[in-house]
């Protein structure tokens, strides 16, 4: 029939379900059977209803509109049967009415089937997106029922535990747990259902998991509860923290090694500062005794050499003292009850500590007297900067200015001198240990002062910078946090 060829062309592009190519033959067979039954029905009245089976065969096809195409074919078959079957005893209007009712039933079934197919396709699409999201997550997601049976298990869980979803789904979730968690799990579920007491649900904690190969690993587990279709389910989110625990263990080991190294460095610095000073003191005393005993035999040059020897001894003692201080920067606990001073007084005390010569003028900004600062380590920082300005000055007299301003929640302190200045190419070098830009014989000190200042700043997360040029003096600027809490009480 022409209607068959039309129906076949209409179905082109609909396609059928993968692996179901025989569906086309089955649908065709059902249509042929319906058409044959319709034509052979003695009364030729109600045979058209057989096409309902033909329309229902559209459920095997992927496209929802296939049901409408089959309904159109069934309509053609039904109308053909009305015109082609032999006359029957029933009145024509009765036969026509039955055919109309048949067509109404056929199209009603087609539209119902189409709606169901569309709803199923939408649900399948949503489930596909949800599955893609779940399988794309880094964390494992497991859903279990009230009896502990696994209902869903995403791809991340397969990577974490080593089991496939098919191996776990339908099994008790405790197969993923080592003892004692495995033995306690069912009892915990029963206790929760009976009393509502939570030990992990809605809380989360670190537990252990059991892989397929029998290895145990640490994991973070959080469990939430939900109700679906009147049934309670539990969703667990699992994260393998093996790498994190290894990193923590390595960090603890490194910290332990670092603390041991620091203790050894402290011990070495203490020994160097004390044990090495003993022979230095012997050298100093012996040189004095020799000078006294041989006074009548020594000329001016010999006395000058003796004094030079003692100067080297004092420089070595200063170097050992500074090494001890440098090694302990940042490792000595800060006293929470330490003294807080008026900023201006703190700088003045630092100047006394650095033995500021009377020929030098110290100008301290009034702004420092409006704040209070911790006595340590800032007094030592200011003392080192003032001492550095004096030691490297090219004149017998000079001026040192200390100023302060606030910027970005920080105090910015500047110590400026009117000395010879430093070429920019040496700005970073001056902060290195044992470094001076002048010959050792012209500079008193160990070359550690600025290195100690920079290390102190780095320990407290602050920084120090230098602005200078030859003939324009030096300006050292360092930052210090403004206290965020209530202003500390100034010590009188």
Image: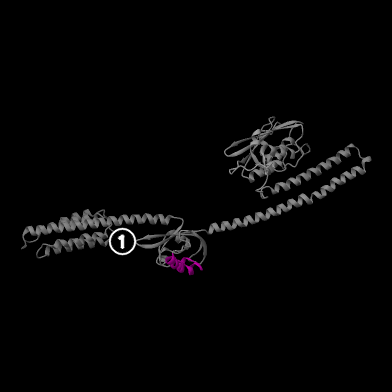
**Residue in view at x 89 percent, y 37 percent:** 300
Question: Do we see residue 152 in this rendering?
Answer: no
Q: Name the chief secondary structure element in magenta.
A: helix
391 relative to 157, above or below: above
x then y, percent, for residue 410: 60, 39
**Residue in view at x 81 percent, y 44 percent:** 313
Magenta-highlighted residues? 173-195
Q: Is residue 404 left or right of residue 116?
A: right
Which quarter of the figure is the C terminus placed in?
top right
Which quarter of the figure is the N terminus placed in?
bottom left
- Does the segment drawn in magenta span residue 175? yes
In the picture of the structure, the residue carrying the numbered disc 1 is 19
Q: Is residue 151 left or right of residue 273?
A: left
- Residue lying furthest top in this view? 471
Is 105 or 347 nearer to us in this picture? 347
Kindly indicate the quadrant of the structure image that contains residue 437. top right
Kindly indicate the quadrant of the structure image that contains residue 223. bottom left
**Residue in view at x 28 percent, y 55 percent:** 118
Is 129 or 383 nearer to us in this picture? 383
x then y, percent, for residue 40: 12, 65
311 relative to 219, above or below: above
x then y, percent, for residue 380: 70, 42
Q: Residues within 10 Å of mark 1 (few under 14, many from 20)?
A: few
Count of marks placed on residues: 1
Q: Is residue 412 left or right of residue 32?
A: right
Model colouring = one colour
Question: Do we see residue 187 in this rendering?
Answer: yes
- Does the segment drawn in magenta span residue 422? no
Circle 1 SS class = loop
Q: Is residue 166 left or right of residue 255?
A: left
């Amino acid at each position: 029939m022409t209607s068959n060829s039309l129906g076949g062309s209409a179905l082109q592009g609909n396609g059928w379900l993968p692996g179901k190519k025989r569906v086309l033959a089955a649908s065709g067979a059902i249509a042929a059977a319906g058409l044959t039954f319709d034509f052979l029905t003695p009364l030729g009245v109600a045979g058209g209803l057989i096409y309902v089976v033909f329309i229902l065969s559209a459920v095997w096809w992927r496209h929802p509109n296939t049901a409408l195409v089959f309904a159109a074919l069934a309509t053609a078959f039904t109308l053909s049967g009305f015109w082609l079957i032999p006359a029957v005893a029933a009145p024509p209007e009765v036969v026509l009415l039955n055919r109309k009712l048949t067509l109404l039933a056929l199209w009603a079934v087609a539209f119902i089937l189409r709606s169901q197919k569309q709803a199923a396709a939408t649900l399948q699409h949503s489930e596909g997106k949800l599955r893609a999201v779940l399988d794309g997550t880094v964390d494992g997601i497991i859903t279990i029922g009230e009896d502990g049976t696994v209902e869903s298990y995403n791809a991340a869980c397969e990577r974490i535990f080593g089991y496939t979803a098919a191996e776990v789904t339908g099994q008790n979730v405790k197969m993923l747990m080592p003892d004692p968690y495995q033995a306690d799990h069912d009892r915990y579920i029963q206790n929760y259902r009976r009393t509502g007491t939570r030990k992990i649900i809605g809380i989360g904690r670190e537990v252990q998991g059991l892989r397929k190969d029998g290895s145990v690993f640490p994991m973070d587990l959080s469990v939430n509860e939900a109700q679906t279709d009147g049934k309670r389910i539990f969703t667990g989110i699992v994260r393998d923290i093996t790498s994190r625990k290894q990193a923590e263990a390595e960090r603890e080991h490194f910290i332990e090694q670092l603390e041991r190294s620091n203790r050894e460095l402290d011990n070495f610095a203490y020994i160097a500062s004390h044990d090495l000073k003993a022979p230095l003191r012997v050298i100093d005393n012996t040189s004095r005794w020799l000078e006294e005993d041989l006074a009548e035999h020594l000329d001016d040059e010999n006395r000058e050499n003796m004094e030079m020897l003692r100067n080297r001894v004092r420089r070595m003692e200063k170097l050992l003292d500074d090494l001890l201080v440098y090694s302990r920067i940042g490792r000595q606990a800060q006293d929470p009850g330490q003294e807080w001073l008026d900023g201006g007084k703190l700088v003045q005390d630092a100047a006394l500590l650095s033995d500021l010569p009377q020929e030098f003028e110290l100008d301290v900004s009034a702004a420092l007297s409006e704040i209070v600062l911790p006595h340590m380590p800032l007094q030592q920082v200011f003392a080192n900067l003032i001492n550095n300005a004096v030691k490297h000055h090219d004149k017998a007299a000079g001026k040192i200015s200390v100023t302060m301003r606030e910027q970005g929640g920080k105090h910015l302190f500047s110590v400026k001198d009117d000395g010879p200045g430093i070429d920019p190419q040496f700005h970073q070098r001056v902060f290195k240990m044992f470094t001076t830009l002048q010959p050792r014989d012209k500079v008193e000190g160990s070359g550690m002062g600025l290195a100690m200042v920079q290390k102190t700043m780095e320990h407290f997360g602050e920084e120090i910078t230098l602005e200078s040029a030859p003939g324009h003096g030096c300006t050292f600027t360092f930052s210090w946090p403004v206290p965020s809490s209530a202003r500390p009480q100034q010590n009188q």
